[in-house]
Amino acid sequence: MSPTHRHGPRGIDLSREAAWVLHAAVVEHAERTAAADGDVGRVVAVIDRIESGARLDETDREVAREALDAHLENAPERDREPAAAVRTALGAQASSSQ
């Protein structure tokens, strides 16, 4: 049997493509925030949690949802389905962690 590989933060079951879209969306969010002279601290913390596979708390998930929404405004068609899967997974984690 081949090993199972988990993609994305702990507690969120994502395909490789969905994990990539999540990461890309949050990185873009950090870049937009920095360009607007905003505080990127929270967004960078979310990136760190995603990259390390840590669990996202509710505030992290809200940052991720905002990032996904902004990403989808100009995203290529190939990102739309994985982004929807991430939104669903983020919601599932929220209900299972309470």
Image: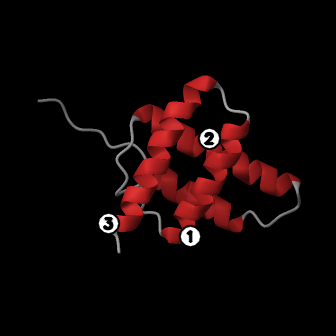
Judging from the image, the colouring scheme is secondary structure
Type of the residue with mark 2: Ala
Task: Tell me, for residue 96, which label it has, or none.
Answer: 3
Q: Residue 78 location, x and y as percent?
A: 56, 24
- Residue at position x 70%, y 67% in the image: 41
Type of the residue with mark 3: Ser
Q: Are marks 1 and 3 in contact (CB under 8 Å)?
A: no
Name the secondary structure under disc 2. Answer: helix
Q: Viewer-proximal residue, 84 or 5? A: 84
Q: Which residue is mark 1?
A: 59
Q: Residue 51 location, x and y as percent?
A: 50, 50
Residue at mark 1 to residue at mark 3: CA–CA distance:
15 Å
Residue at mark 2 to residue at mark 3: CA–CA distance:
25 Å
Q: Which residue is mark 2?
A: 24
- Residue at position x 53%, y 61% in the image: 61
Type of the residue with mark 1: Thr
Q: Determine which quarter of the picture holds residue 48.
A: bottom right
